[in-house]
Image (cartoon, rainbow, N blue to C red):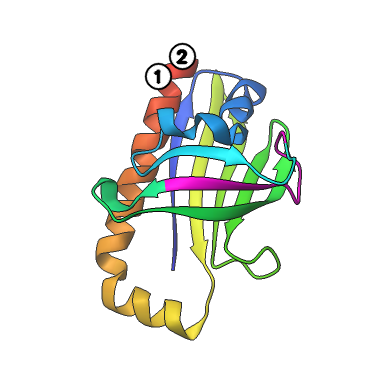
Amino acid sequence: MQDSVTVHMAASPERIWELVSDVTKIGRYSPETFEAEWLEGATGPVVGAKFRGHVKRNGRGPTYWTTCTVCESEPGRAFAFGIGPSDKPLNVWRYALEPQGDGTDVTESFQLARTPPLRLYWALFGWARGRTNRNGMRTTLERMKADVE
C-alpha cells in the first residue's frame, strides 16, 4: 500500500524543493492534479498549512477537489502532505531530496493508511492503481527535471 519513484536531477536540493513545495504549480507537473490552492489563509509550505488540489483521476475522471495538510516541510530535504483528516490522513504523498553527485536524487512516494476499507481497495485494485501511481510519479518527476535542468 505504498510505492516510490526516484529520478536524479542536475540541480540543487534547494531549487528542487521550491518546485515540490509550491503546490500552486503542481498542474505543470502532475498528470492527475491540474491545480491547487492554499486554504484558510495559508500562503506557503509550513507544517499544518492546508490546501486543496483539483484532481482528474487517471487523467480522465472523475474530477474532484481534495483537501490536504502539510505534514512535513524541511527546505532542501523533504516535503509531504496528507490527504483527508489532518490527524489521520488516508494517503501521504512525500518528496525526499538527497544530494548525490552533480545534483539531487528526488524520490516521490505515497503511503496509504492501513484501514480496513483501504486494505480491501488495495487488495482488489492495487495492481492497477499502483501502476497508475508509479507512472504518474515518474511523469511528475521527469517534468520537474525538465524545468530545473
Give residue 146's mark.
1
Residue 60 drawn at (x, y percent)? 23, 48
Q: Residue at x 63, y 66 (%)?
A: 85
Residue 65 x/y as whole percent:
47, 52
Quadrant location of residue 86? bottom right
- Which residue reaches farthest front? 40
Give the residue type that dot 1 points to.
Ala
Label 1 close to label 2 by CB (< 8 Å):
yes
Choose between 7 and 69: the one closer to the eye.
69
Residue 14, image quadrant: top right
Query: Up-down: is 130 above or below 12?
Result: below
What residue lies at 51% left-to-right and 29% top-to-bottom? 25
Q: Which secondary structure lies at badge 2?
A: loop
- Provide the residue span drawn in magenta: 43-54
* Mark 1: few/some/many CA within 10 Å (<14, 14-19, 20+): few
Q: Secondary structure at mark 1?
A: helix
The N terminus lies in quadrant: bottom left
The structure residue drawn at horizontal position 55% and vertical position 21%, both measured from the top left corner, is 103
Is residue 138 rendered to the left or right of residue 144?
A: left
Vertical position of residue 126 compared to residue 130: above or below? below
Percent x, y of residue 28: 42, 27
Task: Measuring from the top left, give residue 27's x and y in whole percent.
Answer: 43, 33
Answer left or right for 21 relative to 122.
Answer: right
- Residue closest to the eye, 30 or 105: 30
Relative placement, left or right, of 70 versus 94 is right
Name the residue tied to disc 2: 149
